[in-house]
Amino acid sequence: MFIRMLQFLAQAIPFILLCLAARKANLNKIDRGRQVLMPFIALLYCTIVAVILTQFHSLLIEIMGWISGFLPFLSNAGISHYMNLFNLLIVVIFLVLKGIFLPVLNKTWKSKNLMQLTSGNFYEYEEDLDKWLLKKEYEQVKTYCNGIYYAALGASVLIFVLGQMYPKMAFAQTPCYPVFGVLVLGEVINYLSGISRTEFIEDVLGEDEESFKVANYGLLKDILKDLFGERVLYDATVDSGLDVSSSFETLEEMKKSENQAIRNLAGYFTKLKESGQDVEPNYVKSCANLICGQSTLFCNPFYRDLTHYLMFPIMGQLMRYKKCLVIMGRDSATEDVKEWLEQGIFENVNTGSLWKVGVLENENPEIDEPDIGILKFSDLYNLRLQRNHSDFLSRVGFVFIVEPSRLLASGQAGVSLLVHRFDESKEPVVYAACDRNCDGLVDALSHVLKTTITEVTATLKSAATTSIMCWNAEGDYMHHRIFSNVSRYLGMGTEINAVALKYQIANTKWISSEKFPVMDMKWIAG
C-alpha cells in the first residue's frame, strides 16, 4: 500500500508543479500591487469553467473513454484519473491567461491615481522611495496566507491520491475540482505578497547584514570597460558611507537646547528616524536655523529631498497666522511644487484642508487667497498681480525660492521690488532657497533679498559605496557594439543603460538640465 501511495503521489507531481508555477508567475514584488484584478480574473475563470464542466461532465467522460481506445495507458483509468487530467488542463489554460493579463495590468496600473483607487487599502506610496509598498499591518498576513495556500494544495493532492487508491468509493465517483480553490486562493495571496517598507530597506537597499539583493556594480563596470574601454576617462569606487550615529548625536544635542522649538524639532526628527527614515544631520541643523529666523541656502536642487526639513518652519509660520511665498525659478515646475507642498502638509497634519496652497493669480484674490502662495517666474514683473495680492504679500513671513540661479540673471529687479512689499516692521522675513552649486549665489541672494545668508548646507555626498565611471562623448558612436545595423544616433546614455539593464540592474535614470536632451534621446530610443 505504501508503494502504491508513492506511485499515486508521483502522478500528482505535474499538478503540484503547475500550481506552483501559477503561484510564482507574477509581476516583481515591488510592482505586485498592480495585479489587483488577478484574483477577480481567477474567480471569473474558475466560475466559467465550473459551469461548463457541470453541463458537459458526462460528455467529457465519454470523450475520455473514446480516447482511451487509442491510448492504452488510459484504458484502465477511472473517473478519478480523468479528474486529475482535467485539473491539470485547467491550470495549464489559466497559466496561458495569466501570461496574457499580467503585462496588460503592469502597463495599465502605472497611474498613481489608479493605484490609490484600487490598491490603496493594502499598499501605500512611499514618496522617498518612489515605490508602492505593502502596508505594515499586512506584513504578517503574508506568512499566514502562504501556510493556508500550501495546506490547500496538500489537501488537493490528498484527494487525488485517495481517489486513485480507492476508485470504487463514493467520493471517488464524484466530479472533483479542488484546483478552483487553489487558483483563486493563490491569486489573492500573490496580490498580498508585495514587498513591505521594512523588507525594501533591509533587503533590496542592502542595509541588512544578510541582504542578498544588492546589485554588484563591480561586475557591471568590468563589462562596460570591456565594451567601451578606450573611451573611459575615469573609473573609481568610493566608499563614503555616513556614520549612522551622527544624526542621533545631533538630535541628542538639540534636545538639551534651552529653546523649546528646537527641543520639539529634535523630538520630531527622532520619531522620524526611529520609524526607519533617513535623517540628514546637516539638514536638521538648517531646519533649526530657519526656525530661529536665519535664512538658509540648500545646495540641493531636488526640493522633494527637503520635505521634512522645510515643512516644519513653514507650518510654524502658518500657525502664527503668517503667509508663506514660494518663488519659482522656472514655470515648468510650478504644478509639481504645488503638489509637493500639498503632500507635505497632508503627511504632517493628516488633513489637506487646514491650509490652502495656490498659485498667485489676478482673479479674486480676496475670495480665494491661499496660505502658501506660489509666484511663477513669468509673473515676477507683473505689478498688477502684486498689487492685487498686496495684503497677502504684506503678511508673508517665510519665502522659499526654487532654483534662484535661474531668476537672478534677468529677475533681480523683480525680486528686489517684491521684497519691498513684505512688512518686516515687527519680524524679519525668513528666506530659504534650494539650488545646485553655483559660484557667487550666496552673495547675489544676500544682495537682492537685502538679508545676510550665512547658513549654507553643502551638497550631500553619497551615503553608500558608489561606483563612478566617466566616458568621453566625442568620437565614433558606441551603440554599434550593442545594437547592430542601427545607423541613427541613439545618444551615449542609451547604450550604457542597455548594458546595465541586460545585466540585471533594476533601474537606470538619466538626470540632466538643459545641456543634454534626455527627452529627445528617450523618444529616439523608444
Image: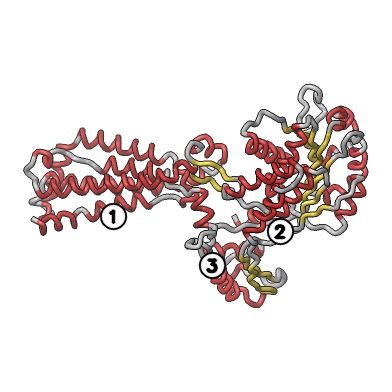
Which numbered tag is attached to residue 392? Answer: none
Labelled pair 3, 1 in contact (Cβ < 8 Å): no
Question: Is 481 placed above or below 201 here?
Answer: below
**16 to the left or right of 385:** left
**99 to the left or right of 363:** left
Tag 2 residue: 460
Give the mark nearer the N terminus: 2 vs 3: 3
Q: Nearer the viewer, residue 229 or 180?
A: 180
Tag 3 residue: 216
Q: Position of residue 150 (x, y in %)?
A: 29, 48
**What amino acid is at disc 1?**
Leu
* Residue plotted at (83% across, 34% down): 396
Tag 1 residue: 17
Residue positioned most to the top: 367
Q: Position of residue 526 (x, y in %)?
A: 59, 54
Give the mark nearer the N terminus: 1 vs 2: 1
Residue 489 showing in the rendered view? no
Question: Is 508 placed above or below 446 here?
Answer: below
The Cα–Cα distance between marks 2 and 3, rounded to whole angstroms, is 23 Å
The Cα–Cα distance between marks 1 and 2, rounded to whole angstroms, is 50 Å
**What amino acid is at disc 2?**
Leu
**What amino acid is at disc 3?**
Asn
